[in-house]
Image: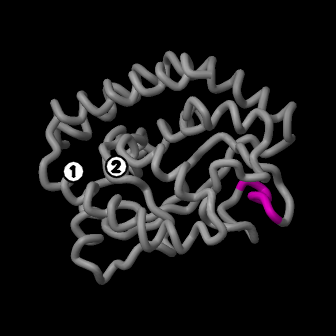
């Protein structure tokens, strides 16, 4: 077991003990606001090109344009807009402070994800024949990471357009892929801890700006 995995398990256990009561409260709020299921299972590309179901609290309404039955199947766009009409009232709050991603601690615990790593991507945007993607997928995707921190605000701004998927694929995805490549080549335990600290600090900023 490498140092990164040991760090993931230790921090996930500590965070999980603290976060469990919060997660239960959020689950109740989501259920009261928009019904069941409370979790959304998004298909993402994992390590070595193996797809997995990334967990989130459900923030979008069910139905033909939402995420029916909490699965990754949807007739709506695969790229979520900043002011997407499918987002529920509770979902807007959860997304604003990124607490909808709390269930991903389970993905980390079972080894599908890491606390820090490349951004988990929808399989339809991944080219497994591309050497860049092969390098990025040599490690588990992360709940947070340099790419998630660097491009969150830019993504929210640029995807408020007529054709969000085209903008994402042509403008944002190449930048994110390059950032994820750098992470894979240069990451270290201290770098991961620094990234976690920056993530917590950014969440604090999200709360105070509301």
Question: Magenta region: which residues?
Answer: 65-70
Instruction: Tell me the quadrant of the picture where the C terminus can be found.
Output: top right
Reading the image, the residue beneath label 2 is 147
Q: Residue at x 62, y 71 (%)?
A: 163
Q: CA distance from mark 1 to mark 2?
A: 9 Å
Are dots 1 and 2 in contact, CB under 8 Å? yes
Name of the residue lying farthest toward the bottom:
129
Left or right side of 143 for 137? left
Between circles 1 and 2, the one closer to the viewer is 2
User: What is the quadrant of the N terminus in the image?
Assistant: top left
Q: Is residue 68 magenta?
A: yes
Left or right placement of residue 170 versus residue 59 in this view = left
Kindly indicate the quadrant of the structure image that contains residue 121: bottom left
Q: Which residue is mark 1?
A: 183
Helix, strand or loop status at disc 2: helix
Q: Is residue 139 above or below residue 89?
A: below
Tell me if mark 1 has few (under 14), some (14-19) or many (20+) residues whose alpha carbon lies within 10 angstroms of its own: many
Q: Which of the 4 image quadrants contains residue 29?
A: top right
Q: Residue at x 22, y 66 (%)?
A: 135
């Amino acid at each position: 077991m490498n140092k990164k995995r040991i760090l993931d398990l230790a921090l996930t256990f500590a965070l999980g003990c603290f976060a469990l009561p919060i997660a239960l409260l959020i689950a109740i709020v989501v259920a009261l606001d928009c019904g069941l299921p409370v979790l959304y299972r998004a298909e993402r590309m994992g390590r070595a090109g193996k797809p997995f179901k990334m967990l989130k609290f459900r923030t979008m309404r069910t139905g033909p344009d939402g995420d029916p039955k909490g699965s990754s199947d949807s007739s709506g766009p695969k790229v979520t807009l900043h002011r997407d009409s499918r987002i529920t009232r509770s979902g807007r709050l959860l997304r604003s402070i990124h607490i909808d991603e709390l269930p991903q601690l389970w993905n980390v615990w079972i080894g599908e994800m890491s606390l820090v790593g490349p951004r988990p991507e929808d399989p339809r945007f991944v080219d497994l024949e591309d050497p860049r993607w092969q390098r990025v997928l040599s490690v588990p995707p992360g709940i947070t990471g340099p790419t998630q921190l660097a491009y969150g605000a830019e993504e929210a701004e640029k995807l408020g357009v007529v054709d969000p998927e085209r903008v994402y694929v042509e403008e944002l995805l190449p930048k994110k892929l390059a950032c994820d490549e750098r992470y894979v080549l240069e990451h270290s335990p201290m770098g991961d801890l620094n990234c976690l600290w920056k993530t917590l600090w950014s969440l604090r900023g999200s709360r105070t700006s509301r």
